[in-house]
Image: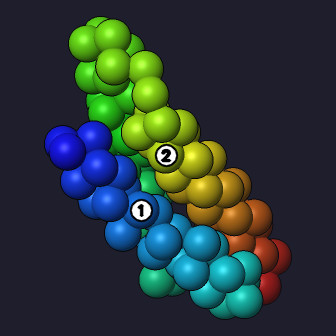
Amino acid sequence: MSDILETLMLVCFGLSWPINLVKNLKAKTVKSTSFKFLLLITVGYLCGIGAKLVSGQINYVLAVYFLNLIVVGANIVVYFINKKHDRENG
């Protein structure tokens, strides 16, 4: 049961990242994006992955952590693309 609840928590958080990614792609600016926040979220997901690996709980929940980490990583990539746009546009 705890794995199901953890997965639901990750899915709820994880659904926000593609929405944020699309918003940032359309905005083409970093003005409303916090790089420190993205890094903090990344560290949180890495800690969750580490906890699963250390405890030996290699299951579907771990896959959800990795999926969320990938989408947050895409948000970080878009951050740097948008930062370049901001520099070019003054």
Residue beneath the point at 49% across and 46% down:
64
Mark 2 vs 1: CB contact within 8 A: yes
Asked whether 30 or 77 is in front, the reply is: 77
Q: Is residue 85 left or right of residue 52?
A: right
Q: Secondary structure at mark 1?
A: helix
Q: Which residue is mark 2?
A: 64
Residue beneath the point at 43% across and 20% down:
58
Q: Is residue 85 left or right of residue 61?
A: right
Q: Which residue is mark 1?
A: 11
Specify the amino acid type for callout 1. Answer: Val
Q: In the image, residue 74 lies at what x, y percent?
A: 67, 56
Quadrant position of residue 9: bottom left
Q: In the image, residue 62 lies at what x, y percent?
A: 45, 33
Asked whether 77 or 46 is in front, the reply is: 46
Residue beneath the point at 20% across and 45% down:
1
Q: In the image, residue 80 lies at what x, y percent?
A: 68, 59
Q: Is residue 23 above or below residue 16?
A: below
Specify the amino acid type for callout 2. Answer: Val
Q: Is residue 17 above or below residue 67?
A: below
Could one spot residue 41 in this view of the protein?
A: yes
Q: Is residue 72 above or below residue 88?
A: above
